Amino acid sequence: MTDASMRVLSGIQPTGQLHLGNYLGAIRNWVAMQDEWTAKGHECLYFLADLHAISMPHVPAELAASTREMVAALVACGIDPARSVLFNQAQVPAHAELQWLLTGTARMGWLNRMTQWKDKAGKNREGASVALFTYPVLQAADVLLYQTTHVPVGEDQKQHLELARDIAQKFNNDFAPKDENGEDAPVFTLPEPIIPPEAARIMSLRDGSAKMSKSDPSDMSRINLTDDADTIMQKIKKAKTDPEPLPGDAKGLEGRPEAANLVGIYAAMAGTSVAAVLAQFEGKGFGAFKPALGEVLVEQLAPIAARYRALREDRAALDAILRTGAAKARALAVPTLEKAYQALGLVRG
Ligand code: ADP
Ligand code: TRP
């Protein structure tokens, strides 16, 4: 893959508030990729997966509000609509169109194996929506529509990316036209997932074996990007720990998931390593470590929270960001969507 042909894309469902897990596992990585790649002239596309959000029961007014809030949150975190293409799927009909075209290629067996489908449908498959089942095909369309080369996602999305590659490969095999030299001219690029090695999984503050998630009923289990300084300090103070002091190296954190999680959060937020954090706090108890962690969090998150609160009030500005981003995305989507229609033998004027 040459530098000139790189394109980054990722999406997030606009459901609920962003928390520290989303920030460290996904959004911060989006911002870093934007800063690095757009400077070299590559395109970065980030979108709100609002079409995906209707695969689960939802309240329409809440979806609309969450979509705008999530735009405010992403911009507050550092996504710059002047450099990245920031949009919502619902304003780019090509996502839904390509999804339909790809349902002819995706196999029932492939979708049946998706762990997210199995988890979310649970025992009630008959009652699950068709959208929940075909969710990964829409995700494949999101990625393939733009000839995406790199997709920054959390570990949990790896399987969906593999499916997108399988769909692209089969479509190219079955339908790719020939170029003027008689060679296959692939319609789709095979995308690579980019999974951040550290901070890939931030755990609940109440249970070191469960991931920090918006679906945890206890708000004390997570730090929301909108929490104020007092709330952050309080949540860290109440976070579950053990009575031992901090060890001198990472090995000493084995079997201590809560301690490992807090040290990992400190390292990720302070932009340093677990080893460096332990070198600083070796032998200290949580009575000393927790206030220091709280301060790092407040220092990093306070400016994000302040920007977020200011932005979310300005609905006209948020809608303008989405409108502009969607117009750019619609233009970028045209060539691939047309190629896909043509490859399938569908007559287009
Ligand atoms: P949630 O688990 O809160 O419902 P989502 O599933 O909507 O979050 O995830 C949105 C993005 O944030 C995904 O890229 C996912 O991998 C990432 N993410 C979510 N929770 C965590 C976590 N605890 N640690 C690291 N990354 C996470
Ligand atoms: N399914 C992803 C998640 O839950 C969101 C998503 C939708 C996505 N379409 C995408 C991520 C395309 C990357 C690329 O986090």
Image (spheres, rainbow, N blue to C red):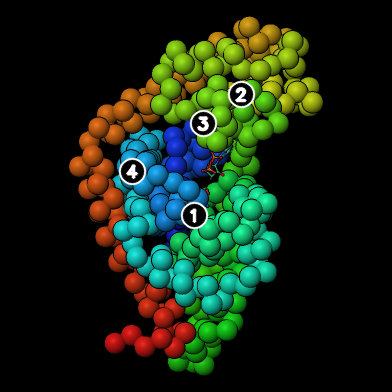
Q: Which residue is mark 1?
A: 55
Numbered tag placed on residue 61 in the rendering: 4
Mark 3 residue type: Leu
Q: Which amino acid type is shown beneath numbered disc 2?
A: Leu
Write down the residue under mark 3.
Answer: 20
- Is residue 116 visible in the rendered image? The answer is no
Residue at x 33% of width, y 25% of height: 306
Residue beneath disc 2? 205
Res 167 seen here: yes
Is 221 or 299 nearer to us in this picture? 221
Q: Name the front one of labels 3 and 1.
A: 1
Residue at 51%, 73% (x, y): give it.
102
Q: Nearer the viewer, mark 2 or mark 4?
A: 4
Up/down of 221 relative to 92, above or below? above
Contact, mark 4 vs mark 1 (Cβ under 8 Å): no
| Amino acid tagged 4 | Ala
| Disc 4 element | helix
> Mark 2 or mark 4: which comes first in sequence?
4
Q: Residue at x 75, y 23 (%)?
A: 256
* Helix, strand or loop for disc 2: loop
Mark 3, other Cα within 10 Å: few <14 / some 14–19 / many ≥20? many
